[in-house]
Image: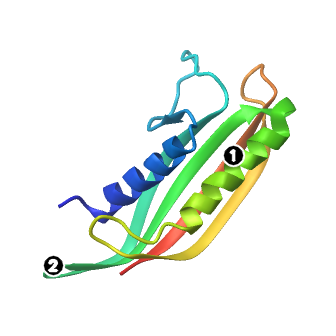
Amino acid sequence: MLSPQIQLFNAIFAASESLDYKTIDYSPTNDESLPYPFVFVAETNSDDVINNKDVITGRLRQTVHVWGYAHYRAMFTDMVYQLEMKMRHLTRLKNYHLEIAGLNSNQIFDNTTTDNLLHGMIEVEYKLT
């Protein structure tokens, strides 16, 4: 059986791909040329996970980054919104039930390259039942 962390990661990765977004599972390097926009499914964190024989409960958090060109702001904002909606409606993993405990997101201008970019970050937290 896969851990709840990898099941959550896989579910959010698949949700992003189902929206036809270029989705990656690693942090791109400066030397790498990835076409914008793209989604990076990043860190998965858990705490207060209690293993009582075969029962695991607790909280899981997933961070998702979105990068896109600033001059396509409406498309970028819609990407972030569509991902948020997929995460809000995620209630079941293969072996676990989820209840959303919170979702935070922000969108900032990114000046780390010569391109005029927007960087969105979504942090979602679930109670694992």
Q: Is residue 51 above or below residue 13?
A: below
Query: Secondary structure under badge 1?
Result: helix
Q: How is the image coloured?
A: rainbow
The 10 Å Cα crowd at callout 1, few under 14, some 14 to 19, many 20 or more, is many
User: Looking at this view, is 30 or 117 the one in front?
Assistant: 117
Q: Quadrant of the C terminus?
A: bottom left
Q: Quadrant of residue 59?
A: bottom left
Q: Is residue 66 above or below residue 117?
A: below
> Residue 69, labelled with which disc?
none
Q: Quadrant of the N terminus?
A: bottom left
Q: CA distance from mark 2 to mark 1?
A: 37 Å
Residue identifier under label 1: 79
The 10 Å Cα crowd at callout 2, few under 14, some 14 to 19, many 20 or more, is few
Residue identifier under label 2: 54
The kind of residue on which mark 1 rests is: Met
Q: Is residue 27 left or right of residue 122?
A: left
Which residue is rendered at x = 49% and y = 58% of the image? 62
Q: Position of residue 26 (x, y in %)?
A: 45, 35
Q: Is residue 6 left or right of residue 123?
A: left
Mark 2 vs mark 1, foreground winner is 1
Q: Position of residue 101 (x, y in %)?
A: 55, 77
Which residue is rendered at x = 55% and y = 68% of the image? 89
Which residue is rendered at x = 74% and y = 55% of the image? 106
The kind of residue on which mark 2 rests is: Asp
User: Looking at this view, is 24 or 90 the one in front?
Assistant: 90
